[in-house]
Every structure is written in structure tokens, then in C-alpha cells.
Image (cartoon, rainbow, N blue to C red):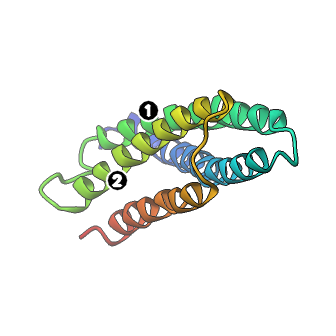
Amino acid sequence: MFDGLALIYPYVKAFHVMAVISWMAGLFYLPRLFVYHAERGASGSEPVSSFVIMEDKLLRVIMRPAMIATWISGLSLVLTPGIVSWSMTWPWVKAVCVIAMTVFHMWCAAERRRLAAGSAQTGRRYRMMNEVPTLLMVGIVTSVIVKF
């Protein structure tokens, strides 16, 4: 590894981990907000305007910047010479899982717009979708740590 890269690599890696944690926190929490929004809105027991605000801010202020930071820092790490051997299986598994996580993020954004417009799925469906980032996280972490 080049001397300059060797100096900044640990900082980029640390920033990447922090960005991933922030993004994952949002991906775990936003579908849970969708559950509450759909169930409270359907029963008419609570105004849903506070859910619309929370969902919007979580997505725009935390999740989107964290996703972008994750991608930029992750690509920086991948492009560092000598770090990733693409002849192994694990980087491909991780790449597929990260792309799937990004697709899930986009699904959340589209679902937030539907909920804000007054159209929602059932709370049960959102509960099931809440498990998607967990499964993807298992694939990502296992592939990076075990390096199969």
C-alpha cells in the first residue's frame, strides 16, 4: 500500500464503520415508524402528521447522508490497492448485500411518500419488511469477518 494511503486508510475505515452504523440505525427504525404510522392512521386514534415529520427527517437528515457516506468511504476502501481480492467469494456477497440494502433504502423512501400521501400497507407487512436489513446485515458482516 502507498505510504499516503497507509496513513489515511484506518481513518477512512473508521469513518466507513460510523456511516454504516448510522445508516443501519435508520434502516432498522424507519420501517418500525411505518408500522406505527399505518396502525395509528388506520384506527384514526392519533394524528399521523407527527409520523410524517419523523419519517421525513430520519430519511433526509440521517439515512440519506449516511448512505452516501457509506458508499463513498466503502468504494474508497475497495479501490485501495491490495485490500480486496475479487477472486474470493466474500467481496461479491458483500457487494450484492450492499446493493440490496440500497434498494431497500429506496423502497423505504417510496413507502414514506405513500404514507405521507395517505396510502399505506398493513402494519404486518411493515413488520415483515423490518427484518430485511437484519438479514442483509448478517450477510455483510459474515462475509467481511469470515472472508470465505
Circle 2 Cα neighbour tier, 10 Å, few/some/many (<14 / 14–19 / ≥20): many
Q: Which residue does the numbered mark 1 point to in the structure image?
A: 72
Disc 2 versus disc 1: distance between alpha carbons? Answer: 16 Å
Q: Position of residue 26 (x, y in %)?
A: 63, 47
- Looking at the rendered structure, the secondary structure element under dot 2 is helix
Q: Residue at x 25, y 61 (%)?
A: 90
Instruction: Give the quarter of the image for residue 59.
Output: top right
For the N terminus, give its image quadrant. top left
Q: From the viewer's perspective, tell me whether residue 64 is left or right of residue 83.
A: right
Q: From the viewer's perspective, tell me whether residue 41 is left or right of residue 64.
A: right
Task: Name the amino acid, label 2.
Answer: Cys
Q: Looking at the image, is mark 2 or mark 1 earlier in the sequence?
A: 1
Q: From the viewer's perspective, tell me whether residue 92 is left or right of residue 38.
A: left
The one nearer the camera, 101 or 68, is 101
In the image, residue 77 sits, relative to residue 148, either above or below, namely: above
Q: Residue at x 34, y 53 (%)?
A: 97
Marks 2, 1: nearer the viewer:
2
Task: Name the amino acid, label 1.
Answer: Ile
In the image, residue 49 sits, relative to residue 1, either above or below, namely: above
- Looking at the rendered structure, the secondary structure element under dot 1 is helix
The one nearer the camera, 136 or 76, is 136
Q: Residue at x 87, y 45 (%)?
A: 46
Q: Which residue does the numbered mark 2 point to in the structure image?
A: 97
Q: Position of residue 15 (x, y in %)?
A: 56, 43
Farthest right residue in view: 46
Q: Residue at x 60, y 53 (%)?
A: 122
Instruction: Give the quarter of the image for residue 71.
Output: top left
In the image, residue 147 sits, relative to residue 23, either above or below, namely: below
Q: Is residue 133 visible?
A: yes
Q: Is residue 69 visible?
A: no
For the C terminus, give its image quadrant. bottom left
The one nearer the camera, 16 or 101, is 101
